[in-house]
Amino acid sequence: MTPEEFKAAGYRVIDWIADYRAGIEARAVMAKTAPGDVKAMLPASPPRRPESFDAILADLDRVVMPGITNWQHPRFFGYFPANALLSSVLGDCVSTGLGVNGLAWQASPALTEVEEVVTDWLRQMLGLSEAWSGVINDTASTSTLVALLCARERASQYSLAGGGLQSEAKPLVVYASAHSHSSVEKAALLAGFGKTNVRVVPQEGSHAMRAESLASMVSEDIRDGRVPCAVVATAGTTTSTALDPIEAIARVATANNMWLHVDAAMAGSAMILPECRWMWEGVEHADSLIVNPHKWLGAVFDCTIYFIRDPEHLVRVMSTNPSYLKTQADGRVKNYRDWGLPLGRRFRALKLWFLIREQGVEGLQTRLRRDLDNAKWLAAEIGKTPNWTVLAPVPLQTLCIRHEPAGLIGEALDKHTLDWAGRVNQSGEAYVTPAMLDGRWVVRVSIGAELTEREHVQQLWQLLQDLVR
Amino acid sequence: MTPEEFKAAGYRVIDWIADYRAGIEARAVMAKTAPGDVKAMLPASPPRRPESFDAILADLDRVVMPGITNWQHPRFFGYFPANALLSSVLGDCVSTGLGVNGLAWQASPALTEVEEVVTDWLRQMLGLSEAWSGVINDTASTSTLVALLCARERASQYSLAGGGLQSEAKPLVVYASAHSHSSVEKAALLAGFGKTNVRVVPQEGSHAMRAESLASMVSEDIRDGRVPCAVVATAGTTTSTALDPIEAIARVATANNMWLHVDAAMAGSAMILPECRWMWEGVEHADSLIVNPHKWLGAVFDCTIYFIRDPEHLVRVMSTNPSYLKTQADGRVKNYRDWGLPLGRRFRALKLWFLIREQGVEGLQTRLRRDLDNAKWLAAEIGKTPNWTVLAPVPLQTLCIRHEPAGLIGEALDKHTLDWAGRVNQSGEAYVTPAMLDGRWVVRVSIGAELTEREHVQQLWQLLQDLVR
């Protein structure tokens, strides 16, 4: 494809995206595809000869689109708001078109320096002190793994440079709450700690970690000859956006020389609102912190910011310096390859840079406040409706709700909950995610897609009431 | 930004990319920016109010572009060919515009199923048997970490489900050659093996791993009470595209129940040419294998394929299954979140799907054969020129060369090499990467950018001869 052909085809792709977004409300939210439907429409073998761009675009509509669940739909209330604002989409398209790779500063200085500046912009927007440095990773899962590797290496005094984790005399222990994200346990297991060294700290009634329990579990582990290594506190848990008491957890961590990692993948975006910052009080005592602009804030996936206070330690854990990556500038610049797992690096900063500039901080703040208001409104409506319950505090934009007809309890109630949630999703009118809370199924309503206005929340609420009948 | 505004701005972005690509040859290959230059042009704080798209695009030219090293330039001979063919760029733009996330099959069935099909297309293109299943990861670094974690867990009989790596009685050992990529040692250290358990297997004269040495090191480790866990063989090393003898290495691995991971990040693309497949003879005995379509093949970064023979083992190592990710379809579908590190997942298959269809297998083959011919031509030219040497076999498209004026040896020769390589890069006319080979600096010339024709290789060769004078 020549640049001239690219222009013609590119306009069609832009039109296609614009039309998709403009008409998204008319689509079913969840794909109605059965397993294997998409696969069955694709040739089993690759084409030997070139195909026309017409044919490819036609298959996009014919094969792919029926199998798409529309995350940008105004009645997408599942998982989390995965906003991909159109300015951010264009920033990412520029990155893709440039086709540069930031495996060293010299390999494209602007890639590194725009990333330095824009992660620092975000730091300021979140009200964090100058002690933090940021780097863009793909996901929170990967970043949490990096955090626990850093914790492991600090506690073991760089066992990676010697005999490895096996050479440690005492078991290292990681602590998190039952409501921490699944990626936390996964990261701990992959980092080699082992399931018997991962502690689930009990929760308060509000589904937040109980700091007193953490303290006593830590004492017990020390008494039994183990080494408390790291604790992960969550600002905005996945199920109910519960807020772990970071300040109290930090006191335990500091007293016991443990690494404190704060998972603010979800709630982090809200910290651009000064009135929300009480939610992560104590965050300045953490060693590492993640925020996902690819969730509520609006940067198209993937864009997780990993903030750290001690970049030298991170580099000591992650650095490799083979001859073929050395350049004349190395001593004077950041080489982000030494700040995380992958060597290769897309120009991800562009999508965040485009987003923040096109929206302005105030534009982003206005949208997030709209969503918080919508969540409050829905919680109030549900709270005053018979047989409906909101089951957890709603500090942000996610509600855990249940329809509880008189006399329905236990597994029968679970069946009812999963039934009506399934009907909501099958209807195509809205999408919600069920989850377990206090041993029973609830339905999560996660508000905050860019296009979600009050009317869409009202439509959802009407739909729920209609479908449980 | 509304869809209508996006259309207008999007056309300008498409024009911008087309013009960038059309005019790329007139640009200096390497950015002439000094450290801090780009940063100094950016505001220290984010804008409170929205800015116009005009302002953003203007800064792209004013601030970003002087700091870009042009990887798509026809005289880019550095690192590796990081081709981002324009059809692949458009596939990725569609993915970005859709803004969907494949954290479960149901979260966008097409995302998962197109990935299943297109990775299987690639399997067929590479001449691999049906025993292999593929998944798209971001990079080879991450995939190698996944491979060594799988190896660790197989050797330790799932220590992650128990006491972790610390509970293993005997040290686990990983083997690779001195010419394996830096990400191999990094992955081994992050997986917790420890540097004293990472063996560097000596090389043959051709810079490939010596299988006999591997066998004797493995025996020695067993004798000393250690457990050989994994060996990484490289098809196409970074410095010189040396080819480790996979068949012979596999015999050692099989005899000792070791995990064999093949790093074909670079040479993998060449396997679409049947005449190149002798280079990874024995690959069918491997447990895992990586190929980077984002290198020579032409899919825009990031796109690494991780092929495995035992998906059940992979899932057992990587799986988490919290309630909020469960769906009604789970038992009948692939959930790729359990095939690697990150939970969230872009629709990366589109860029590979667009590429293979727009080029056809034959189109891709023709381009790669052109590059192999160009490398042969340059090797022949250098071979017959006094004072110039090709220092390693050239099975693919990378040459390790040196200008060796009479009497210049040792550090003086190193200084001369780095001097002229620096002059090449500073000139802006071409870009090359120095590297160490056999204890001395050489200059790598990696041929294979999409736009690189014979004339560009001729221009490079003329430039080198001019600049060493």
Image (spheres, coloured by chain):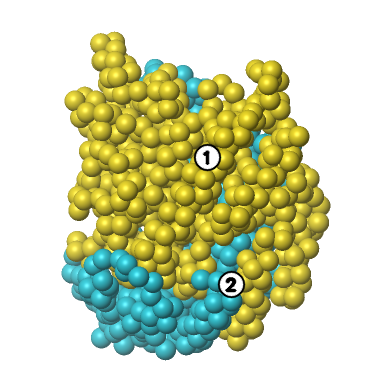
Chain colours: A cyan, B yellow
What's the amino acid at mark 1? Ala
Q: Position of residue B139 (x, y in %)?
A: 45, 48
Few, some or many C-alpha atoms within 10 Å of disc 1 (few <14, some 14-19, many ≥20)?
few
Q: Nearer the viewer, residue A246 or A314?
A: A314
Q: Nearer the viewer, residue B397 or A65?
A: B397
Answer yes or no: are tags 1 and 2 on the same subunit.
no
Q: Position of residue B243 (x, y in %)?
A: 38, 35
Rendered view: A10 above or below B466: below
Q: Position of residue A298 (x, y in %)?
A: 57, 68
Q: Position of residue B44 (x, y in %)?
A: 79, 55
Numbered disc 1: secondary structure:
helix
The reply, left or right, for residue B197 in relation to residue A149 is left
The image's mark for residue B380 is 1
The reply, left or right, for residue B338 in relation to residue B34 is left
Q: Nearer the viewer, residue A277 or B294?
A: B294
C-alpha gap between disc 1 and disc 2: 33 Å
Label 2 sits on residue: A3
- Could one spot residue A45 in this view of the protein? yes
- Using the rendered view, name the quadrant where residue A357 is placed: bottom right
Q: Which label sits in the foreground, 1 or 2? A: 1
The reply, left or right, for residue A369 in relation to residue A389 is right
C-beta proximity under 8 Å, tags 1 and 2: no
Residue shown at the point (27%, 39%) measured from the top left: B281
What's the amino acid at mark 2? Pro
